[in-house]
Image (cartoon, rainbow, N blue to C red):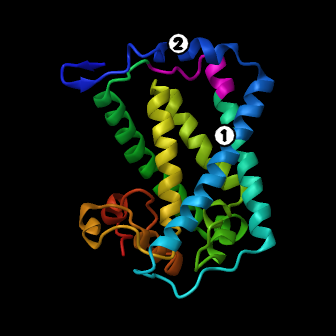
Amino acid sequence: MIENGFLNFSGSGFPEYIKILERLTWLDWVGASLAVNIALYLFSIGLYLSIEKTCPKNKLQEYSHPVMRSDYYLSFVTILCNCLVMLCGVFLWKNNWITLGNRFSAVSVFLEVLVLILLMDLCMYFFHFIAHTPYFYKRLHGRHHEHVNTNFLSLFVLHPAETIGFGLMILVVLVCYDFSVLSISLYLLINLIWGTIGHLNKEFFPPQFNKYFVGTTQFHNQHHVDETKNFGFYTSIWDRIFGTYK
């Protein structure tokens, strides 16, 4: 419904989602987790390939990184790790560590998603920076950076510890504040789309987006070329503040 000039979902049955979720068994949650993460994985690949095919200009790299068997293996492990993180989130919710809010107005959802993006961008900046220290880079993050020229699996070519670490950061944030399920879902979808676009070999964003502190495709591509710069994900704000922007 429209309320005070804003779209409001409070009368659309959204509060009933809690009752629906509470009826699910652990077996239901395992199946749902696998289905959701596999669907997102296929969506990311489809989005990557469709953009690469329809945007012939603005090439950042001459060629894509060859898709190796190990890329598929690591990407499947990433799916399983994401499933594990989701199930951990369900456990925390069932035990009242995570509370899901009931704010579904367009304004509240927009603000919650914005807070999640900026807060997670800050957390990911430091997490990413630490991943590039010699100890962790050699043991964990270096495999991802073998993809200087990226491909449609590069986003998922991660050490399991990195995937779980990113997931745990999200869970800590969700424990600290009762974001609505809609805000969380939109944020996670944006995260997937942004990660997919960030690992393209062609610039997706218009050039002027750089001055708006947006973490463009070229911004992250530059990080794969020069590993000492551009540790942010959604924005270049923290790199500009901490002197790692290029």
Query: Which residue is denoted by mark 1 in the rendering?
Result: 36
Which span is picked out in magenta?
90-101
Residue that appears at 18% across and 19% down:
4
On screen, residue 195 above or below 181: below
Judge left or right: residue 30 versus residue 246: right
**Which label number is shown at residue 132?**
none
Cα distance, mark 2 to mark 1?
21 Å
The kind of residue on which mark 2 rests is Glu
Judge left or right: residue 51 versus residue 242: right
**Occupied quadrant, residue 12:** top left
Is residue 95 among the parts visible in the rendering?
Answer: no
Residue 130 in the image, given as x and y percentages of width and height: 55, 61
Closer to the camera, 115 or 16? 16
Q: Which of marks 2 and 1 is nearer the N terminus?
A: 2
Please, what secondary structure does the residue beneath circle 1 have? helix
Judge left or right: residue 213 versus residue 194: left
Residue that appears at 35% across and 67% down:
205
How many residues crowd around disc 1 within 10 Å: few (fewer than 14), some, or many (20 or more)? some
The kind of residue on which mark 1 rests is Val
Residue that appears at 36% across and 31% down:
109
Residue 114 in the image, given as x and y percentages of width and height: 35, 41
Please, what secondary structure does the residue beneath circle 2 have? helix
Residue 64 in the image, given as x and y percentages of width and height: 60, 80
Q: Does the magenta run of residues contain 15?
A: no
Residue occupying the far bottom of the picture: 62
On screen, residue 126 above or below 150: above
On screen, residue 114 above or below 145: above
Query: Which residue is denoted by mark 2 in the rendering?
Result: 16
Residue 1 in the image, given as x and y percentages of width and height: 31, 19
